[in-house]
Each structure stands twice: as C-alpha cells, then as structure tokens.
Image: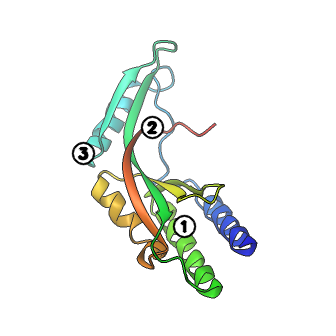
Amino acid sequence: MERIAFFAFSMLYFALLSSCGTDEKTPPKPVTADTQESSTVSSLKKELEESGYEIFDYIDEKTGDTILMQQYYIAFLKSGPDRSQSPEVADSLQALHMAHLARMYEEGYADISGPFGDDGEIRGITIYNTPTLKMADSLANMDPMVTAGRLVIEVHPWWAAKGFPLR
C-alpha cells in the first residue's frame, strides 16, 4: 500500500510539474478593475459565454475589483464496486489513472486533482474546466480506474473566481 501511495504521489507531482507550463490553455490571471481595462473583462466574458461556460461577475465592495466567477465541475472519485485487483493490476491501473489525469491537465480540461488523506469512501477529487456537466462526467468516466470498477464518479457544479490561485 505504501508503494502505491508513493507511486501515486510521484505521478501526481510529475503531472502537476508538467502542467505548470504556460501555453494557450493556461487559465487567465484574475481580471480586476484596477489591473485590467474593462474591455478585457468584456472580451473574456464574451469568449467564455461563446464557448458555453456559465459565468457571472460582481464588484468586490472592499477593493472595487471586478470578480469574474465561472462554473467548474468537481468530480468526486469514490470507492468502486471492484477493488479486489491484485497488487500488480492495481499498480498498473494507478499508472493509467495518473496518465489519464496528466492528459486532462495537458488538454486543459482538469485544473486540480488529488487524493484525500484518509481511507474513506471518497478517494479524491478532480476539478474539471469544461462548459457542461455532461462533458466533465464523460471525461471523468474515461479514467481507467473507473472503467475497471475500482472507482466511481460523482460530479457536481462548483463556482470559483476565474484565475485566482489556491492559497
């Protein structure tokens, strides 16, 4: 089990490092009234709306900044009905799972992912940056751990400020 956890952590670390590059799919920096022209906010809103994303904006009363909110989708990865694989098969599935997540990062569909630190029913999460629940659900269900029955997916809409980093 420790070997699987170490491998999972190593693969996640690699996926995160490789996803830190700056390419055209990198989310925009926070758009605020004091750092960007209002036409930038308007063009970003138009681009997101035309791509099918649900958004809204508001003015932060403290700072006067325009905050652009976008709907994302959180996929909860839960223990599946078939967790009886041999250690070799489980290790192979873990490698395929990490490759799937790396692909989701590379293609701009996943923004953050990771396992939980306990041994509960919910094993981890992935936040998908897609315009629809159907698309996020479809991508999450392509995970080899899910197709093997080791995990099941539960997806929920979630709102976050566009471009703000974790603290």
Q: CA distance from mark 2 to mark 1?
A: 22 Å
Q: Tell me whether the residue at label 2 lies in contact with that at label 1, contact meaning CB atoms closer than 8 angstroms.
A: no
Along the line of sight, the residue nearer the viewer: 135 or 57: 135
Q: Secondary structure at mark 1?
A: helix
Q: Are marks 1 and 3 in contact (CB under 8 Å)?
A: no
Relative horizontal placement of residue 113, taking residue 39 as reference (left or right)? right
**Quarter assignment of residue 2:** bottom right
Reply above or below: 86 against 45: below
Residue 154, percent across and down? 39, 57
On the rendered structure, is 3 left or right of 100?
right
Q: Give residue 25's position: percent from left, percent from top.
A: 46, 54
Q: Which residue is mark 3?
A: 50
Badge 1, how many Cα within 10 Å: few under 14, some, many 20+? Answer: many
Which type of secondary structure does the marked residue at label 2 adopt?
Answer: loop
Q: Position of residue 55 (x, y in %)?
A: 32, 36
Residue 80 in percent (x, y) is at 46, 70
Q: Residue at x 44, y 37 (%)?
A: 160
Q: What is the three-letter code of the residue carrying label 2?
A: Lys
Residue position for label 1: 102
Quadrant of residue 19 within the rendered picture: bottom right
Give the residue at x 32% y 31%. Answer: 56
Amino acid carrying label 1: it is: Ala
In this rendering, the label closer to the viewer, 3 or 2: 2
Which residue sits at x=27%, y=41%?
49
How much space separates mark 1 and mark 3, taking CA atoms?
27 Å
Among the two numbered marks 2 and 1 on one chain, the one whose residue lies closer to the N terminus: 1
> Within 10 Å of the Cα at label 3, are there few (<14), some (14-19), or many (20+) other Cα atoms?
few
The secondary structure type at the circle numbered 3 is helix
Q: Earlier in the sequence, mark 3 or mark 2?
A: 3
Front-most of 65 and 88?
88
Q: Amino acid at mark 3?
A: Glu
